[in-house]
Image (cartoon, rainbow, N blue to C red):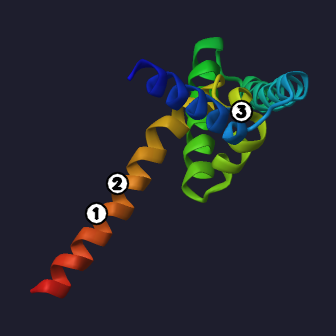
Amino acid sequence: MKVKEEHLMKKFKDIANQETPKSNLVKDCIKAFIVGGLICDIGQVFSEIYGNLGLGVEETGAFVSMTMIFLGALLTGVGIYDKIGDFAGAGSVVPITGFANSIVAPAMEFKKRDLFLAWQQKCLL
């Protein structure tokens, strides 16, 4: 029995190694760094704009946070943020927009499922 288990484990590891996508760590880190940096640069641009409008430091920070969360939620809602995440990996998760994505994406999935369930119930009635 033990020989059979070892054979199955070896076969499983071989299949897992074949199916696991290979990643280039250096390339992935560079993409994450660039995209995460661009997201932060966008936040800095909004910070400068709000600061030039005469807002104080605390108000500027609050408005930048609200703007970035809104943009992250909007991009998630129209399906763009997922593409950014596929390209950049962790670079899109770390900034505040990743927070917005983590809140909106499950809500969008629930809405799709809820609409499907509502459609099923209506068809069955």
Q: Residue furthest top?
A: 57
Secondary structure found at label 1:
helix
Identify the residue position indicated by label 2 in the image.
Answer: 110
Q: Position of residue 32 (x, y in %)?
A: 80, 27
| Quadrant where the C terminus is found in the figure | bottom left
Q: Residue 43, relative to residue 82: is it above or below?
A: above
Identify the residue position indicated by label 1 in the image.
Answer: 114
Residue under the image location 62 percent in, 19 percent down: 61
Secondary structure found at label 3:
helix
- In the rendered structure, which disc, 1 or 3, sits on the residue that comes first in sequence? 3
| Quadrant where the N terminus is found in the figure | top left
Q: Residue 89, relative to residue 26: is it above or below?
A: below
Which is nearer the eye, 16 or 54?
A: 16
Identify the residue position indicated by label 3 in the image.
Answer: 89
CA–CA distance in space, label 1 to label 3: 29 Å
Which is nearer the eye, 8 or 74?
A: 8
Q: Residue 80, relative to residue 58: is it above or below?
A: below
- In the rendered structure, which disc, 3 or 2, sits on the residue that comes first in sequence? 3
CA–CA distance in space, label 2 to label 1: 6 Å
Picture disc at residue 10: none
